[in-house]
Amino acid sequence: MAQKITLSIPDLLHEKLKAWRASFNLSKMFQDAVTDAIQKKEEFQKRFSKDDNMSEIIKRLKQEKLIWEKQYYKLGKEEGLRWAKTAHYEDLLYVLDFNDTYKLITDSKMSDYFNKIYQSNDLANQSGSVDHEQLFIEGWSDGILEFWNHVKEKL
């Protein structure tokens, strides 16, 4: 037994469909398209579940991701510590009091510095997501904070 469903289509497509409706078996077209889409999904799931190594692949990728993340965080922390050691007191306070660390990159007072750092560390040429940039900035900020916590009581 066949079941009926209701579909929605844009007005422009509906206007065109009215002109050509007699030329198409819409029910058959829909059935073929849905059958094809479902088969593709089922085949993908079958391939995915047949791959016994998938859990190993995921485990390896997670480990590589952690190493990748630590690399950019560590680089940022080292750079932040280097900056803090040479920064003027007023600049240290400016950065420490800045509300959104991620916006420092485009801040008029700090953008030249970050442009140079990004170029020298090849951060500007990284493809993909901005995760590497966020990790670098988190490390940079933590490096400065660690430095500040070490020296503030002595000032």
Image (cartoon, rainbow, N blue to C red):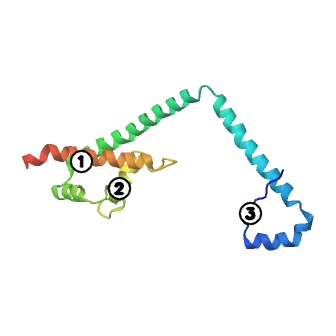
Instruction: State the mark number for residue 144.
Output: 1
Tell me which amino acid carries mark 3: Leu
Mark 3 or 1, nearer chain start: 3
As drawn, is 105 to the left or to the right of 154? Answer: right
- Dot 2 falls on a residue whose secondary structure is helix
Residue behind mark 2: 102
Residue behind mark 3: 7
Q: Disc 3, disc 1: CB below 8 Å?
A: no
Q: Nearer the viewer, mark 3 or mark 1?
A: 3
Residue shown at the point (30%, 47%) measured from the top left: 140
Taking depth in this image into account, of 25 and 53 the one nearest to the observer is 25
* Position above or below: 9 against 57: below
Q: Position of residue 75 (x, y in %)?
A: 35, 41
- Dot 1 falls on a residue whose secondary structure is helix
Instruction: Determine crowd level at label 3: few under 14, some 14-19, many 20+ residues with C-alpha closer than 10 A.
Output: few
Q: Position of residue 36 (x, y in %)?
A: 78, 47
Taking depth in this image into account, of 151 and 131 the one nearest to the observer is 131
